[in-house]
Image (cartoon, rainbow, N blue to C red):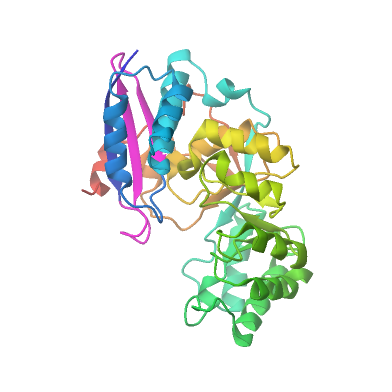
């Protein structure tokens, strides 16, 4: 089997043009087409990289995933683009062998994948009552784990000095208190800080939120200094989660060796693809650190993450987007269904999903 063509398909996503969905289809001479998705967030040139890497793969055997990945990585491939192509090749292999991708990676450890809902607060005012009401609505839909953002409570946006005013800290604390009172102790709650704070502020925030039993405090400081994050983890009093902007197992080495995080959240559509994510998870397991994959993009990345999570023993929980664009599920032929806070494993060969081109064309962008 040989790869004959690589087609890049950018589609409007939420907050367009900030978050496009970038799909890729890898075509073969035996009529099989593999599907992948790249994470273009905070990365430039993804579409051009996909096209260039696609040319490099033309004529290649899609079964030789490890070899292709290493060669493209060593020549400096854009990691989101490489992640999408790697996923698409796994899709082809699974289709050719008539089995889901997770069966090619050791088989399923779970029969369904636990998810937490990000974005439950969208379209709500950043007030304790509004956020608590939105949280109750999400729990009523069957979710038992939620994540909120700190951003809307930072009145002037993220401060250049990475500080946080007393008023902002009070507003965040009161909102978390209102949510916890509304949803009870049986629902997990996490907070994403989007790298907003310095070490002292992150520690102060952690102490303020310690009574509310957070699932984790995510990216409280920028990702560039592992020793600083280790200090936050040691002193903040709440679990620390990070890793969504890190790429490949090499970027996670120091994070694990310095024991700077309680939970790691690499993103399959950015970190290197399915097999690279499994390697990261295996490395993390040697430090007894769980994996909770970041997943902020479209349905293809979500389905690929479901396959991955199924075969990771140290899997904790998967991110799932609420309040995404209304055409999200229309873009694919088999949209995943969340029931009681879980996604069932697909049973069709490969990824178990294909693009619905009749709908994709409505939202496709140049």
* Vertical comparison of 4 with 286: above or below: above
The residue under the point 70% across, 65% down is 232
Q: Position of residue 94 (x, y in %)?
A: 47, 20
Quarter of the view holding residue 241 = bottom right
Nearer to the camera, 311 or 158: 158
Q: Position of residue 158 (x, y in %)?
A: 50, 75
The residue under the point 32% across, 16% down is 2
- Total residue callouts: 0
Quarter of the view holding residue 240 = bottom right
Q: Position of residue 249 (x, y in %)?
A: 57, 39
The residue under the point 65% across, 76% down is 201
Q: Is residue 26 magenta?
A: yes
Q: Is residue 353 visible?
A: no
The span shown in magenta is 12-37
Please indicate whether residue 277 sits to the left or right of residue 69 in the image. Answer: right
- Residue extending furthest left? 366
Q: Is residue 72 magenta?
A: no
């Amino acid at each position: 089997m040989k790869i004959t063509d690589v087609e890049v398909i950018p589609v409007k996503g939420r907050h367009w043009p900030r978050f496009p969905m970038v799909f890729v289809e890898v075509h073969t001479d035996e009529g099989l087409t593999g599907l992948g998705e790249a994470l273009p967030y905070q990365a430039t040139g993804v579409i051009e990289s996909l096209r260039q890497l696609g040319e490099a793969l033309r004529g290649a055997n899609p079964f030789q995933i490890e070899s292709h990945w290493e060669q493209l990585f060593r020549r400096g491939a854009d990691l989101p683009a490489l992640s999408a192509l790697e996923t698409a090749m796994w899709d082809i292999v699974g289709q050719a062998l008539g089995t889901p991708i997770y069966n090619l990676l050791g088989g399923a450890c779970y029969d369904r994948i636990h998810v937490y809902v990000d974005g439950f607060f969208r379209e709500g005012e950043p007030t304790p009552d509004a956020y608590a009401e939105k949280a109750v609505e999400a729990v009523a839909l069957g979710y038992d784990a939620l994540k909120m953002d700190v951003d809307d409570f930072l009145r002037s946006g993220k401060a250049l000095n990475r500080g946080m005013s007393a008023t902002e800290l009070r507003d965040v604390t009161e909102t978390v208190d209102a949510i916890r009172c509304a949803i009870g102790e049986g629902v997990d709650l996490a907070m994403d800080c989007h790298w907003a704070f310095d070490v002292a502020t992150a520690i102060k925030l952690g102490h303020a939120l310690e009574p509310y039993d957070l699932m984790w405090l995510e990216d409280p400081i920028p990702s560039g200094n592992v020793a600083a994050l280790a200090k936050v983890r040691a002193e903040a009093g709440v679990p620390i989660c990070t890793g969504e902007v890190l790429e490949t197992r090499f970027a996670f080495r120091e994070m694990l060796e310095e024991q700077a995080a309680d939970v790691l959240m690499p993103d399959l559509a950015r970190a290197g693809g399915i097999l690279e994510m499994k390697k990261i998870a295996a490395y993390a397991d040697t430090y007894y650190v769980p994996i909770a994959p970041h997943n902020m993009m479209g349905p293809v990345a979500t389905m690929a993450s479901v396959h991955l999570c199924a075969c990771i023993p140290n899997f904790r929980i998967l991110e799932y987007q609420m309040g995404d664009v209304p055409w999200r599920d229309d873009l694919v032929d088999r949209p995943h269904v969340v029931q009681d806070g879980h996604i069932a494993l697909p049973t069709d060969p490969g990824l178990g999903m294909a693009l619905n081109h009749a709908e994709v064309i409505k939202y496709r962008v140049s």
